Image (cartoon, rainbow, N blue to C red):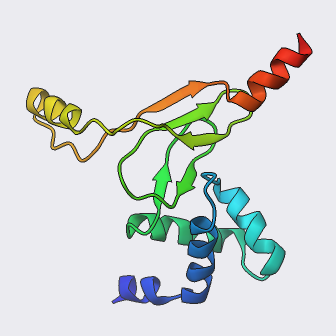
Amino acid sequence: MKKDTINRRNTKQRDIVFNSVTSRCDHPTADEIYLEINKENPHISKGTVYRNLNILSKNGKISHIKVPGSDRFDLRLDNHYHIICTECGKVVDAPIEYEKEEDSIVSKSTGFEIKRHRTVFEGICPECKKSLLKTE
């Protein structure tokens, strides 16, 4: 019963957090989401934002992306890859298809039940590349 109570609490706050994530396409960090929400809703604490991000990701409403630096959140729920800029930290979707057969190959060779795999490409984004060229 306690777990049920936790999932029902803060529905207004959870809606605000959910709307913040789904209104963006830039894979925001929890801090970026908190700062955005705090501008219009200063009564919502950082802990409330973090807790609701975790609940939303566990409930499959948003994706939790684990990348170097700081975890990100995504409105896309399908399995897909990401690219992170090693200069500015920007995260974008990689424009290639998710390779489902890799899950099967690893599962067959290890005995693990594979749910998904994550691939993060690292490189320098076009904007950083341009500014680096200007400084040379």
Among all residues in the image, which is located at the extreme right?
Answer: 135
Q: Is residue 3 above or below residue 77?
A: below
Q: Is residue 29 above or below residue 35?
A: above
Q: At 37% across and 82% down in the image, what residue appears?
A: 3
Q: At 57% across and 86% down in the image, what residue appears?
A: 10
Residue 47 in sight here: yes
Q: Is residue 118 left or right of residue 9?
A: left
Along the line of sight, the residue nearer the viewer: 130 or 62: 130
Q: On the image, which quarter does residue 33 sit in?
A: bottom right
Q: Is residue 57 left or right of residue 43?
A: left
**Which quadrant, please, contains the C terminus?**
top right
Q: On the image, which quarter does residue 31 sit in?
A: bottom right
* Numbered marks: total: 0
Q: Is residue 68 left or right of residue 65?
A: right
Q: Position of residue 6 (x, y in %)?
A: 45, 83
Q: Position of residue 64 (x, y in %)?
A: 48, 54
**Which quadrant, please, contains the N terminus?**
bottom left
Q: At 91% across and 15% down in the image, what residue appears?
A: 135
Along the line of sight, the residue nearer the viewer: 105 or 109: 105
Q: Position of residue 57 (x, y in %)?
A: 45, 64
Among all residues in the image, which is located at the extreme top?
Answer: 136
Q: At 83% across and 73% down in the image, what residue appears?
A: 39
Q: Position of residue 75 (x, y in %)?
A: 50, 61
Q: Is residue 102 above or below residue 57?
A: above
Residue 42 in sight here: no
